[in-house]
Image (cartoon, rainbow, N blue to C red):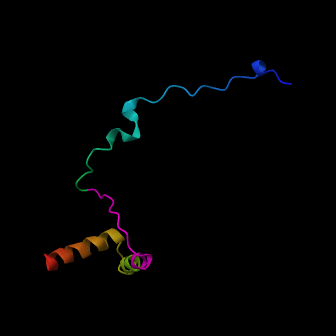
Amino acid sequence: MANLNDLPKPPKKGNPPPSSTSASANNLAKPALNGNVPLQLKISPDTRRDFKSHALAHDMDANELFAKVWTYYKENHG
């Protein structure tokens, strides 16, 4: 039977990182005004597929198509 005192001790975890480098330290900062931020919507898979297909067929990405659709909507519906 093995003697537990003869087994090597596992390495220690070490010191935690400084609190200023944590991932949540900057979670309240506003994004840049000229940058893109995510917008989450719940739509049907068919609508998503149709939207992305339309964007690709017209050499656009989904962000560009959404911006054009939104601009059109605001101009024509208040």
Where 41 falls versus 78 (above or below)?
Answer: above
Left or right: where does residue 34 sit relative to residue 18? left
**Residue nearer the viewer, 67 or 9:** 9
- Quadrant location of residue 61? bottom left
Toward the viewer: 51 or 34?
A: 51
Q: Residue at x 35, y 63 (%)?
A: 40
User: Image point 31% across, 58% down: which residue?
Assistant: 37
> In front: 31, or 19?
19
**In the figure, residue 46 lies in which quadrant?**
bottom left
Say if the magenta span includes residue 43: yes
Residue 2 x %, y %:
83, 24
Q: What range is drawn magenta here?
A: 35-49
- Labels in figure, total: 0
- Magenta residues, dominant SS class: loop
* Left or right of residue 40: residue 1: right
Where residue 5 sits: x, y (%)? 76, 18
Q: Is residue 32 magenta?
A: no
Q: Residue at x 25, y 48 (%)?
A: 30
| Horizontal and vertical percent position of residue 66 | 29, 72
Rendering coords of residue 50 (x, y %): 40, 80
- Tell me the quarter of the image containing the C terminus: bottom left
Q: Name the quadrant containing residue 1.
A: top right
Residues 4 and 78: in front is: 4
For residue 51, side relative to residue 30 (left or right)? right
